[in-house]
Image (spheres, helix red, strand yellow):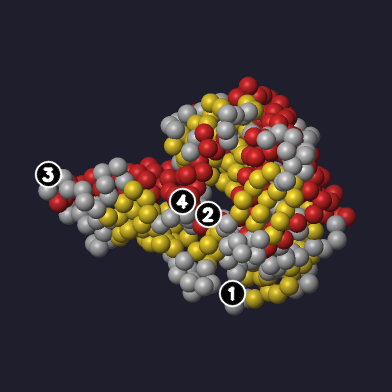
Amino acid sequence: MASEVLINVAPAETRVAIVEQARLSEIFIERTMQPSENARAGRSGHRLLGNIMLGRVQRVLPGMQAAFVDLGLEKAGFLAAREARCLSDLPSFMDQPCISKCVREGEAIVVQVIKDPISDKGARLSANVTIPGRLVVLVPNQSGVALSRRIEDEAERKRLTDIVTEITETDRRAAAGAGYIVRTAALSASRDDIASDIARLGDEWRTIQAKRNMAKIPATIYADLDPVERTMRDGVDDETTRILIDDPEAVAQARAYATRTMPSAIDKIQLFNGPGELFDQYNIEAEIEALLGPRVRLPSGGWITFETTEALTSVDVNSGSYTEATGLEQTSLKTNLEAAAEIGRQLRMRGIGGLIVIDFIHLNEPENIGQVLTVLTESVAKDRTPTQILPMSEFGLVEMTRKRVREPLSKLLSERCDPCHGHGRIRTVATVAAEVIRRVVREAKARPGAKLVAYAAPEVTRWIEAQGDDMAAALRSRVPAGLRLEARPTFARAQFDVGVDQ
């Protein structure tokens, strides 16, 4: 399906939106501001996912079949036995080994973050590290060739397997003894393109090994690409028609990455110069605001309601005022089909993971139930995050899981409201600070040469000032005439104003 990629770059955060058929399909927000003292790296939108780190085993718990690893973060990382298997000497065909056979307390180990810290839980870790390229993923600790499940054509699967096998056996730049996973992007790719990707990954792995030998514990020895390059790697494919970026430096960065790894995408990269703001032109700001609310309207007049608890997310389907002239079963079927088609999109955009229970409107006919499950399956099929769906129960409930790899959007942008005793949510300080900075950049474009002043709540101005020289330099480049921050004690957290400094 044809898509456009929109990248909004600001001093506070980078936001990526993927638009399909004029509708938002996915949204990613990554903070570039430094976290506060109460929100260390890996929280408040700072991504650790994919980073390879050198840590020290803090505790080994055979009763939990897990170990905790000190990575220098607020919380120790969690390493399950199944993710530590590659550290044991047991043959691969044996059952999951005991964690004490894999690691020892006090031992230095290399691990990769496979799930960002979420709420009060530390990062989830794996000792079986992977390094993604554009076409293949390098798996240093295991041999062999595997393929993405989305590559379904048997002839193409054989072609790709043969190419990767031949390259790894003959090309000296390939990582010795490593395995590879062929990504969907490799469909119809040439041998030379695949060989170049494998060579780059081999060089990267050798660099990581050298850093590991010199690093002091704890240390990050490999950081995944930044949001712009990662979007080019993972979010751009042959069906992407245009990549719009509103920052000249980010455009140059995207083009440099494309030149190295995907020359066919260079001409798709464009600088957005207005009029107006990029996300406003595509109504993305309004979409983000809507994603913070629990209710989603359906075309027929019904709605879906999302409610997330610590244990699970419940999704309730309601027909509202809609009635089908042919009867209750058809009314329920139409509403359920609309809901099933929308739920996959909403889960992706909201970043909801874990256990999800969908309460569809009751249906009597097995054929109609089958239609709803088929549409739901198709709705989540394009999701890059693994999902699993169970059959509908007698009560009309469908249980599904979606791998939880990051904070949901609602928790990234908002937090519990203490005055309302947890029954409501307010925007986080970091979220408001990002909004202030976006408004400042917007005003600077509209009033070139004017010195600006931003009025905000004291906790918001303190947050911005605490970012130090990097933030100050970024703001000077976008507001050359200068910016003054003024704290207003009477302002609520979300209240701010930006104007010309008199």
In the picture, the disc for residue 395 is none
Q: Say which residue label 1 marks.
A: 64
Give, as a three-letter code, the residue at label 2: Leu
| Disc 2/disc 4 C-alpha distance (Å) | 8 Å
User: Which of pointers 4 and 1 lies earlier in the amino acid sequence?
Assistant: 1
In the picture, the disc for residue 325 is 3
Residue at 62% over, 51% down:
497
User: Viewer-nearest of labels 3 and 1?
Assistant: 3
User: Viewer-nearest of labels 2 and 1?
Assistant: 2
In this picture, is 356 found above or below 483?
below
The image quarter containing residue 500 is top right
* 457, 49: nearer the viewer: 457
Residue 148 spot, x, y in % from top left: 54, 40
Q: Say which residue label 4 marks.
A: 291
Asked which secondary structure carries label 1, the reply is loop
Side of 380 relative to 392 (left or right): right
Residue at 57% over, 33% down:
276
Give, as a three-letter code, the residue at label 4: Leu
Asked which secondary structure carries label 2, the reply is helix
Residue at 44% over, 33% down:
22
| Disc 3/disc 1 C-alpha distance (Å) | 56 Å
User: Which of pointers 2 and 3 lies earlier in the amino acid sequence?
Assistant: 3
Side of 295 relative to 171 (left or right): left
